[in-house]
Image (cartoon, rainbow, N blue to C red):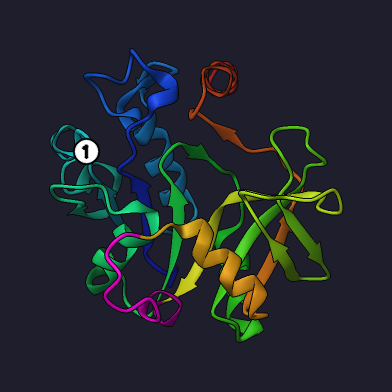
Amino acid sequence: MIFPVAILAGGLATRLRPITEKIPKALLIVAGRPFIFHQLELLKSQGVNQVVLCVGYLGEQIEATVGDGSAFGLSISYVYDGAKLLGTGGALRKALPLLGADFFVLYGDSYLQCPYAAIQATYQQSGLLALMMVLRNEDKWDKSNVLYNEGKIIAYNKKAPYPEMKHIDYGLGLLSRKAIDKYGSREICDLAEIYQNLSQEGQLAGFEVTKRFYEIGSQQGLAETEKYLTTRGA
């Protein structure tokens, strides 16, 4: 059984303004359909059954479009930030009652073709609190921010990467509830900070992939993802 997947889809998508002023990034039309439809179908193909959508900005539109997930063969539930944005870590903590002891975390703007069952097995075998997917990037797609060696994240720093870092956070992770619980009642926090602390504590396993990622977080990424999904479906 594949663990539940939390999709972080609550951001403001400021880099895509003005097209995201009235529609959330997850619902942008890519290759003829809302982007999140592509994500959900990919998750189903990997054996995922349960998804928790962490939403905020214009989240009601996402719920109205996606519904309970039955159209995708999934069970989908929703957790709303509320009056203020909680950050990616804060959104996950609010979703914990629906996620169980262990769960995947996927960014809402990422299209990632990777082997969920193998990733889950690696995480379970590691005995660590979390696992991060990584790609040897060498600053090609974005700034490399991971020092990775033989299945373990030696260091992760999104805000202040250094030259020795050749890998990048791929956009998919696996977390134990314990990794989030330790932040207690702190309402707002960022997943990148949680990952960084876990790497410093020696609690962050790694799983390396070689296939590039696709994302719609930027205009260039949106264009590349549109081209890929359109061509693949032809």
Badge 1 marks a residue whose secondary structure is helix
- Please provide percent x and percent y for residue 2: 45, 68
Q: Which residues are magenta?
A: 177-188
Question: What is the crowding at mark 1: few (fewer than 14 residues within 10 Å), some, or many (at least 20)?
Answer: some
Q: Residue at x 42, y 40 (%)?
A: 39
* Vertical position of residue 32 compared to residue 76: above or below: above
* Vertical position of residue 166 compared to residue 25: above or below: below
Q: Residue at x 55, y 60 (%)?
A: 116
The one of 178 and 215 positioned closer to us in this rendering: 178
Going by the picture, which residue comes out furthest to the bottom? 127
| Label 1 sits on residue | 66
Q: Specify the quadrant of the image occupied by residue 141.
A: top right
Q: Residue at x 26, y 47 (%)?
A: 85
* Vertical position of residue 3 compared to residue 48: above or below: below
- Identify residue type, mark 1: Val
* Vertical position of residue 72 compared to residue 153: above or below: above
- Please provide percent x and percent y for residue 75: 24, 57
Is 77 inside the magenta-drawn segment? no
